[in-house]
Image: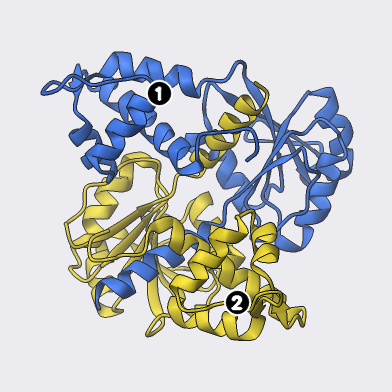
Chain colours: A yellow, B blue
Amino acid sequence: MKDVKVSEPTVERLVKYHRLLERVTGEGRKVISSKEIGEMLSYKASQVRKDLSYFGEIGKRGVGYHVDRLYRHLGAVLSSPRLWSIGLAGVGRLGEAILGYKGFRSEKFQIKALFDVDPAKIGTKILGTPCYSIDDAPRVLREQNIEVVIISVPSGAAQYVADRVTASGNVKGILNFSPVSLALPDDVLLYSVDISVELEKLLFYLKHRGQ
Amino acid sequence: MKDVKVSEPTVERLVKYHRLLERVTGEGRKVISSKEIGEMLSYKASQVRKDLSYFGEIGKRGVGYHVDRLYRHLGAVLSSPRLWSIGLAGVGRLGEAILGYKGFRSEKFQIKALFDVDPAKIGTKILGTPCYSIDDAPRVLREQNIEVVIISVPSGAAQYVADRVTASGNVKGILNFSPVSLALPDDVLLYSVDISVELEKLLFYLKHRGQ
């Protein structure tokens, strides 16, 4: 995470504050306190105040934050200068789940191209998005100016797919859902999500809570 | 996270050290340094040393850690006293992806029962696991002594499902993949995973890296 001062857990909290405020705005609320935000997201109120003040928002003692203003402010911090075009490699169960996931519908990004090895999928549209052969990825990613790719292929295929995808030369970031480490060019940002790690964490806490 | 001293990011790092060591053991390596571990997982070497020494493992200067010993040691820290039985509510695309996810095959836990509202699924086996009506969840969870449930239903149904599941009285932890906040009894541990938050984080860093 070179050149970036804000830590990863902080960014995650910002994203969650922003989503919470979006919901609360929809419910017509005008003000909210750091304590309320903290309770809804399981953070300490002091953490919420520290995060928000770092980004220039100071709540009023005894009143809290103006919901609308805070929502717009965090939106600006998190905003993208443009709509990101996203590619998704691997349209198996997990890939289809990601494609249909409600949270992946956003004004910030759009899944524009799918890649797979299955001849039955290549050349078709899946949930409205065209699917190409993974071997055409370098060309398609360049032509469509896709800079971010989600990888959701079986572990054994993930490095091959990562190599094909980065061969395009214009991919800047990869979100990897395959439970395997990937070797990537230095200028490509990698985020890996292993959904089973969360279950392991939950079980760890359940085990230790009983002691 | 009452009663637990180890922070969530620390647990996540422990899980990742353990998986890395499992792989490295399989490759036949005997020793590994904190620097190497750090490089493979994108952590600082000093962080790795701090984490491991907290759990009683001190590497030898200029040599590193014995892979096999460290692997067994972390395994003991992370181990479960028994096999956890897991339930999974919502066998749509995401639920099926979780069910088939390689990382969810473990000696620590096993998905024993599925729950859905679709009459075409109820009463069948999906990828080898029996599927029940969500309305039977309280009874099935008690009978099979299932203490952890993964929720992967559409947002609008998540709270209803959480209520049915916790009505069993013996569920201690919930792993929620639905992008919505849940209200749960105080004694139930909740972990929420919003897979699109990871994409937002990646885009945030890509945006700020360019500045």
| Residue A42 point in image, percent of width and height | 64, 53
**For mark 2, does the 10 Å Cα neighbourhood hold few (<14), some (14 to 19), or many (20 or more) residues?**
some
Answer whether residue A55 is visible to the viewer in this image. Answer: yes
- What residue sits right under mark 1 in the picture? B55
Find residue A5 and name its label: none
Q: What residue type is labelled 1?
A: Phe
Q: In this view, does A129 lie above or below A199?
A: below
Q: Which residue is drawn at 62% across and 40% down?
A: B1
Secondary structure type for disc 1: loop
As helix, strand or loop, the secondary structure at mark 2 comes to loop
In percent of width and height, residue A192 lies at 38, 50
In the rendered view, tell whether residue A19 sits above or below residue A72.
Answer: above
Residue hosting label 2: A59
Chain of the residue under the numbered disc 1 shown in the image: B
Label 2, label 1: how far apart the Cα atoms are: 40 Å
- What percent of the width, then of the height, locates residue B108? 56, 23
Q: Tell me the kind of residue under disc 2.
A: Gly
Callout 2: chain: A
B54 or A200: nearer the eye? B54
Q: How crowded is mark 1: few (under 14 residues within 10 Å), some or many (20 or more)?
A: few
Q: Position of residue A56 (x, y in %)?
A: 46, 79
**Disc 2 or disc 1, which is closer to the eye?**
2
Let me know if marks 2 and 1 both belong to one chain.
no
Q: Which residue is drawn at 40% across and 46% down?
A: A178
